[in-house]
Structures are given as structure tokens and as C-alpha cells.
Image (cartoon, rainbow, N blue to C red):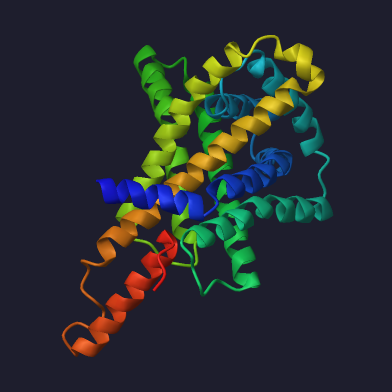
Amino acid sequence: MYHFGRHVVTLTLRGNVLVYAAVLAFFAFSSIIPVLLLILYLASKFMPDQYVMHYLEGELQSYFPDVPNIHNLLATNVQRLAKLGSEVRLYSIIGLVWTSTEGFLSLQQALDALAFTKTRRSFLKQYLASFVLVGIFLIGTVAAAFADAVVQSTHNISPNVSALLSTTAAISFPLFLFLSCVLCYRLLPSQTFSIRWIAVGALFTTISIYVSRYAFFIYAKHLGQYQLIYGALTFIMLLAYWLYIVSFLFLFGGVLMVVLEDSTSDHTPSPSGRKGIKDETQVDTLRKRNRNTRLGIHG
């Protein structure tokens, strides 16, 4: 356990997780509006705007910390974006999709840096993976909004059915976050990791984000009259800080995934099987060299 903790701390420091979290938070902040516009534009083709706004308000409120006036601010901004979503044109969609991929692209580079991957994907493959994830995210969100619209239209059928649907909706938010983490950890890094360690990292990220929501609320509640300090920028400052926390937790989940992969790689049979001691020795040497690089051990 001591060596595992030491490996985690060392990789966190050597991998510049704090720096990459700041970069990731910046691109996440700049991608929020384009992503929401794309969701509203696509969803408006299948259902009325009020159902889409209801779903997005609930989803954003479930992921963002419960700071003062957050609900009114989210509702107001989603309504404004809904009006803009109907005015989006084809050339605007291309720009919005391109902007939305920047967050996933920076996440790819951060995960590759944490794993000290020497052979990385080409520029085109990195953007292709980002486009695929943006597409999956948009389709999943629109499908979830459509399901939420169905729930709203049938909630008066039976109290039992209404309670069941409400419980399902409460579970769907963390489940969606968990599956999103699994997809990112699986598709974005150039190196392929074991699915069990991907699941462990995704589970840690999901739980820690939901726990940190309540901790962030306590922080915001005891911050004092921060409206007097930041004025109209209060919401933006708190949102930027929250995105930085989420980015750090997401990357720390990636650190756990990399460390767990390293801790079991030495005990995993080499691909060469029993064909030759020389091949097995070369594989073990390569694994140890890669692990020592992450730990900062030379020689």
C-alpha cells in the first residue's frame, strides 16, 4: 500500500496533473456554450424546446455544485441558448463541433503525458477520436432528453410509475457520468489500458465529483460576501474554479488507472509466452523502464 501511494503521488507530481487540470478546465469552460448550442439544435429537431430545456436544467444542476442562485442562473442561460439554438446554421455547426473537440483533444494529450506514452496517435487520429466522442456525447444527451420528455408526458399515469421513473432519473445522472469517464479513459489515450482499471478510475472520478459538489457548496457558503469582490463575475469565477476541480479529479482518476496498470503489468504473462527467455526478458525490461520513467528513476 505504501509503494502504491508513493507511485500515485510521484506520478501526480511528475505528470504535472495540476497544470494539465488548468489547461483542461480552460478548454472545458470554452466548450460549454458550443456543446449546449449543439444539443439544443439537434434536440429541437425531435421535440419541443421546453422539454429540452427542462432536461438540460436538471442535468446541469446535478453536475454543478449547489452554490447560491445557481438554479436561476442555469435556467436563464439555458432559455437564452434555446432561442439561439433555432438560429444555428450548417456553417455554424461545423465551427461549434470543431470548438467542442478542443476539450477532448487536450484530455488526450494530458492522459498520454501521464502515461509517458512515447508513441502517440497522429494529429488526424487525435481529432477523429475527439469527433467520435463529441458525437457519442451529443447523441446520448439528445436520447436522454427524449426519454425525459416521455417521462414528463406520462408521469400522471400512476404514482408507482412516477416514483419508479423519478428513481431511474436520479440514478441516470451518475451512471451517465461513469460511462462518459469509461469512454474517455478507453478511447482517448494512445495506450490501451485494462478495462477493469479503466472502470476503477472512472468509478473514483464519478464518486469524487459528486462528493466534491457538497464540499464546494460548503466552501462557497463560507466564502463570505464574494459578490462584493467579484460582482457580476461571481458565477463565472465559481464555475471556472469548479471546472478546475472536476478536471483535476478526472486526471487523478487517470493517474490511478495508470498506476494500477503498472502494478499488475509485472505479474502479467508476456506476449511471447514460453518461446524464449530472451523475449520475455526484453518485455519485462521494457515494462520496468516505462514504469521507472513515470517514477523518475533513472538507470
Point 64% across, 17% down: residue? 71
Point 58% across, 60% down: residue? 109
Q: Quadrant of residue 272?
A: bottom left
Q: Is residue 105 depicted above or below 157 in this figure?
A: below
**Image x and y of residue 217, in percent:** 54, 18
Point 25% across, 82% down: residue? 281
Q: How many marks?
A: 0
**Image x and y of residue 82, in percent:** 75, 31
Point 56% across, 18% down: residue? 219
Say whether residue 37 is visible: yes
- Report the front residue among 173 and 4: 4
As drawn, the residue found furthest toward the front would be 299
Q: Quadrant of residue 68?
A: top right
- Report the front residue among 90 and 212: 212
Say whether residue 48 is visible: no
As drawn, the residue found furthest toward the left would be 274
Q: Quadrant of residue 36?
A: top right
Q: Is residue 248 depicted above or below 229 in this figure?
A: below
- Quadrant for the C terminus in the image: bottom left
**Image x and y of residue 41, in percent:** 72, 41
Asked whether, in this view, residue 49 is left or right of residue 193, the answer is right
**Image x and y of residue 25, in percent:** 64, 42
